[in-house]
Image (cartoon, coloured by chain):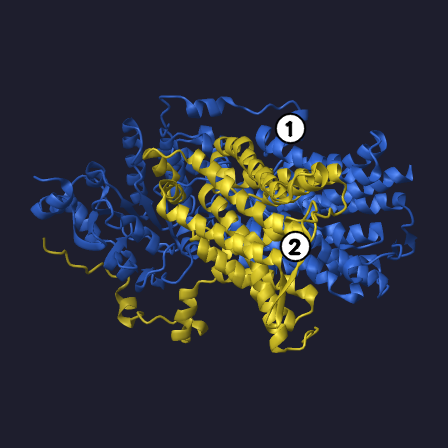
Chain colours: A blue, B yellow
Amino acid sequence: MEVWYFYTGIALIYIIFALSLNLLLGYAGQVSAAHAAFGAVGGFLTGYLLQARQWNIVFALALGTAVAFIIGALVALPALKLSVEFLILLTLAMSSVIIGFFTTFDQLGGINGLTSLPKSNLFGWKWQNPSDWMLPLLVAVVVVFAICWRIGESPYGRVLKGIREDDQATRAQGKNVFRFKVMVFAITSAMAGFGGGLLAAFFQLSTPGLFGFSISLSIIAMVIFGGMANLLGSVLGAGILSFLDPILSRAIGIRADQAGFVRLIAYGLLLVALVKLRPQGLIPEGYSVVGRLRGKRPDTSRIEMARAEGWRPDVSTSIATLAEAEHEYLEHGSAVVVGAERAFADKHDQASRAGLWEDADVLVRVRGLSKRFGGIVAAEDLSMTLRRGTITALVGPNGAGKTTVFNLLTGFIKPDRGSVKLNGVQLVGRTPDSVARLGMVRTFQDVRLFQRLDCLQNVQMAVPAQPGERLVPLFFQPRRVSAAEREATAKAMRWLEFVGMQDFAKVPAGALSFGQSKLLSLARVLASDAQVLLLDEPASGIDTHWIDTMLGLIESLREQRRSICIVEHNLHVVGRLADHTYFMELGRITAEGTIDELTSSPRLAEVYFGAA
Amino acid sequence: MPLFAVTITWDSVSQLLVTGVINGTAYGLLGVGFALILGVSGRFHFAYSFTYALAGYGAFWAYARVGLPFGLAAVFGVAVCVVAGVTIERVGYRTLAHQAGGSALLAIFVASLGIGIAGENLLRLTFSSANQQLDGPSGFRTVLHWGPTSFRWVDVWQVLSAVVLVIALTALLRYTVLGRSIKATRGNPELARIIGINPDTIYLICFAVGSLLAGVAAFWFGLKYSVAADMGFKPVIYAFVVGFLAGTARAPARIFIVGVLLSVVEQLSSIFLEIRWTQLVVFVILVIYLGSLSINWSRVFAMIRNPAALWGRARVDDDEEEEEELWKSGTSTPVSL
């Protein structure tokens, strides 16, 4: 019987490894082939402190965990800007470096590691046999599960998933991706170190083989088997796979020295089969076992509706929503005193629009913005203004550098020279997330939604200053976090209603049509409360009978006293929306004025509008 | 930390250099193969270590168990390696790539891990976990002396075969239609498809060539030391490092030279470090390289030129007057048309 307690103990410790790796791999999408090596940090340190320094297990574990946290953060630093291939390679190398490092110390037993560690005790409660370990290990699993759950299934986890889906788009929502990546690496490494320390104390030894690459691989297999981004799946996956060894050697009767090989062959074949046949694992992401037990079935009718032909956004309620949203926007979004109310009696009167533009406050002032890529001039001495309550259009032939301007303004590309000021604050030199937090957000030409998140989550992601995206409030001010989350949900829902997508709140963004994606991406920028919205081709690729809806929505933003800048090819769209138009050619602004002024120029007509 | 484990003499340094170059040809060869596979097909081929070991076991089985002549056994070993590599691509990766689409890299890496670990342990199960001795003709072991350095015939064979293979691959890529097709696919597989190249076929060829290079390296390794199930792990990790340090889209000769240099640095580091630390040198170089990738060098240079930027957000283009007019209406004059 004791031997089964022993195997249960191993399974419980592997559950800790699998849970923490799932947070890193499943939620944040960061591949680590060094998870067991971080376990070695905790394992060797705990082992050393237990044996040579006679520390109590609690303190030894705590120090091992803390050191693993620091090393995890250090490894994350060079890993941040790397693509997946490089990250795999770096963690492979780190796995060898960490294990190699520990085997070079004679104090740690060299290549043999530490053996015959003392039995652990907790203030007189001696953990003699595996059965004595059951309770402490169970507590440890529950604690780790709770932490992973709190991080993963919260606004924090939403950002992690955003990074997994598209880290540039996440930065565009004002999230400091750098901070999240370092933190999640450090936390998961700490948990691996904790697991490693437990493993060493439980086995009473700490050897390189206990934390080698094949162990890292086994943990990856457990996570993928259980299901990525599903913690319950990891518990099952690690639980089942850990028992493979004893079942093979005891129940089937394979020789003990060969059971290890057979198990690894089984792991390998399982990985291949899973990737091929069931990539989502045992329990797929977002599948709620508890919900299913209560008889709730996932509602697929909405997804079918999203794919159906002829769906049209329902914006009949938007006018009412708008009043509410505007109220909200003015209350939270802008501290600036609202100027005199303007009458937009005749929106299509060009002359009055030009006058409007002249009178409006300048929100963004761009001066002398230049950028070269080698010999190619992407932007040359650009100067422009974006003004409150107006819509500015950026037009020009393909390759004129219009999207590059958006990239330069929002910090995705660093200009060589020039300045961009928003309310007098210099934006040049700031990161994209910092620009977004200061109040200038953009959409992308190719939309870049978070495909596997639902529409509501996509919009929630843009809500600024959520306490649930910081760890201290997340764990120490749960009430504040849940109140803020309710608020963010309500707000995101209002913007979804505003664009007529309220029925799709629970539909994954990947299931939407292109036109619906465009509407959702509009809702996403609106939820950011930003004063300046840069919309990259908001009406392109949209079904003709929706264009009116889309343009109506954008026009109504003017009334929210925001400043809108659009890049657009369609001159009808520009003519209807824009109060002021800049014309770009080969990286330079060569003309500006109302669209009528521009279209009446024979030269521009030839360059862009087609020969007259 | 132990320093100066070896007393520095010209003799010892030249021996280290020679050993470095000899080992480096193996790193280089594998690096070239890995880069060809990853660079062209985009597959992170971790099971490369398994196919590497297969070449050793194939030769060992044919020579020691079946009793084939040594040369034939060598060819058989390399052939097993090539067939395995091509089969993995054809049966495994290709279907996965078609199935997984955008997230294929991770899916293929995981599958590759699975194939590698399953294959490695299958070898242990069939041949026992002990190392197997591949004893070729004794002539390979004859020691040669060149100045103060010594090496064996097998080392000469290894260096020559590696150089010949790299030259042959260079010629293939540069002067043949197939080579140009490979480079076109590496540049843009979709575009290559439009002009009538089938990328899937090109990938198969890359796996065949990459496995051939690995097989040759593995054969010499097995002959010099022994054949073991995990013999491929370290060399293949080094191959990854070489491939990434050199750049996977680079010319074979360049990748090969990076491999040789890396090995020489590893050997020379043993002057300063105990032998067990020298392996880490390779990884430290890698970590430094990858770390440097994530540093924004233009920003660093800007800071060196303008140290004030370090202390505050000092900007050259901040002019005072701008602040005043900020809340006034815009003053830009329309450009005359």
Secondary-structure class at tag 1: helix
The residue beneath circle 1 is A291
Chain letter for mark 2, please. Answer: B
Horizontal relation, residue A529 to residue A103: left or right:
left
Circle 1: is it few (<14), some (14-19), or many (20+) Cα within 10 Å? few
Mark drawn on residue A80: none
Residue plotted at (75% across, 36% down): A262
Circle 2: is it few (<14), some (14-19), or many (20+) Cα within 10 Å? few
What separation in Å lies between label 2 and label 1 (alpha carbons)? Answer: 72 Å
Quadrant assignment, res A291: top right
| Figure check: B132 above or below A551 | below
Given residues B156 and B316, the one toward you in this image is B156
> How far from the left and from the top, in percent, is residue A175?
48, 51
- Check disc 2 and give the amino acid type: Gly
Examine the rendering and report whether any part of residue A238 can be seen: no
- Check disc 1 and give the amino acid type: Gly
> How far from the left and from the top, in percent, is residue A185?
61, 53
Q: Are marks 2 and 1 on the same chain?
A: no
Horizontal relation, residue A444 to residue B79: left or right:
left
Examine the rendering and report whether any part of residue A368 can be seen: yes
| Figure check: A288 above or below B293 | above
Chain letter for mark 1, please. Answer: A
> How far from the left and from the top, in percent, is residue A41?
71, 58
Quadrant assignment, res A348: top left
| Figure check: B326 above or below B118 | below
Secondary-structure class at tag 2: helix
* Quadrant containing the N terminus of chain A in the rendered view: top right
Residue plotted at (71% across, 54% down): A193
Quadrant assignment, res A74: bottom right
The residue beneath circle 2 is B139
Given residues A524 and A473, the one toward you in this image is A524
